[in-house]
Each structure stands twice: as structure tokens, then as C-alpha cells.
């Protein structure tokens, strides 16, 4: 479960960066934490996240999560199925959003000077604590699911 350990470390780094007001660094680490947790689930379920061109691996694995749920569903209790389906869908959605935002944090906007700083301050300062809490919750959910498999 090395991916989960790495996910927790990235989440811890995200929390530390947030406390230092390094919002962009924090968001990139939070997204990496979620990515690693989702990849741990995909690995356990035997779902490949290799790029179609064979050159490396996908970073945004959100499109693979519905297949993960399909493989996971027969192993779940009936009372758990709907909740886990919704939570995995939310985790995939958050991962897709964070991947896009992480790219802005890492590379900025090509045509706007200082747009990254403006974006980060307006967007991340307002909603970042919620993002960190959600990523932590999804890592815990995936950890519980992996322990059931």
C-alpha cells in the first residue's frame, strides 16, 4: 500500500504548505495525494492507467473511476453501494478539477501576467480548507475499500 502511504505524505505536505500560505504548492500536493490514493484503488482492481500512446502513465485518472466502481460493486454490501458510488464520483470530480487547477498553479496562464497569483489568492484562500478535508476523506475511504478487498 505504498501509494496510500505516499498519498498521506503528500496530504501532510499540502497541509504544511497551506499553513505557510503557499496555496499553489499546497494544491499541487493535495491533488497528488488524491491521485495516488485513486491509483492505489485502480492497482488493486487491476485497472491500468497507462497512457494510450504507451508513453508513461495518466495523471488524471478520474475517467477510470466508473470502471473501478463496477469492479468493486459486487464486493460491497448492498447498504454501502449507493454511498460509495457517490463518494467515488465526487472523488473523481474533485481530482479532475484539481488536476486542471494544479496545471494553472504550476504553469500559470500564458497570456496574463501575474494571473496565477490572482487566481490562487481568490480561489484557493476561500475554499482550500474544504479541499484538504475532502482529499483526506477520500484517502480514508479508499483505504477502507482496499482493506475490504
Image: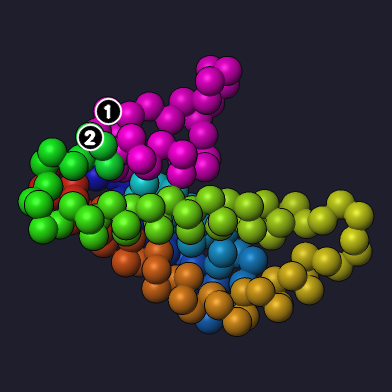
Q: CB of mark 2 within 8 Å of CB of mark 1?
A: yes
Q: Is residue 62 above or below residue 28?
A: above
Residue drawn at (30%, 38%) of the image: 68
- Give whichever of 148, 12 is nearer the camera: 148
State which region is magenta: 40-68
Residue hosting label 1 = 46
Which SS class for mark 2? helix
Residue 71 is labelled as: 2
Q: Residue 137 in the image: x percent, y percent?
A: 32, 66
How far is the residue under mark 2 from the one under mark 1?
9 Å
Most distant residue in the top direction: 54
Which SS class for mark 1? loop
Q: How is the image coloured?
A: rainbow
Residue 106 picture quarter: bottom right
- Give whichever of 123, 21 is nearer the camera: 123
Nearer the observer: mark 2 or 1; the answer is 2
Magenta stretch contains residue 45: yes
- Give whichever of 37, 77 is nearer the camera: 77
Query: Dot 1, crowdedness within 10 Å: few (<14), some or many (≥20)?
Result: few
Magenta stretch contains residue 20: no
Is 6 displayed left or right of 31 in the figure? left
Amino acid at each position: 500500500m505504498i501509494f496510500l502511504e505516499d498519498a498521506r505524505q503528500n496530504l501532510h505536505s499540502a497541509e504544511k504548505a497551506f499553513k505557510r500560505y503557499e496555496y499553489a504548492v499546497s494544491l499541487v500536493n493535495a491533488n497528488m495525494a488524491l491521485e495516488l490514493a485513486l491509483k492505489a484503488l485502480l492497482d488493486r482492481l487491476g485497472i491500468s492507467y497507462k497512457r494510450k500512446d504507451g508513453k508513461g502513465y495518466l495523471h488524471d485518472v478520474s475517467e477510470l473511476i466508473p470502471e473501478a466502481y463496477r469492479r468493486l460493486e459486487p464486493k460491497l454490501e448492498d447498504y454501502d453501494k449507493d454511498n460509495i458510488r457517490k463518494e467515488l464520483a465526487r472523488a473523481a470530480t474533485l481530482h479532475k478539477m484539481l488536476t486542471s487547477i494544479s496545471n494553472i498553479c504550476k504553469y500559470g496562464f500564458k497570456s496574463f501576467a501575474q494571473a496565477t497569483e490572482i487566481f490562487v489568492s481568490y480561489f484557493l484562500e476561500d475554499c482550500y480548507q474544504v479541499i484538504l478535508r475532502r482529499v483526506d476523506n477520500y484517502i480514508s475511504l479508499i483505504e477502507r475499500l482496499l482493506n475490504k478487498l
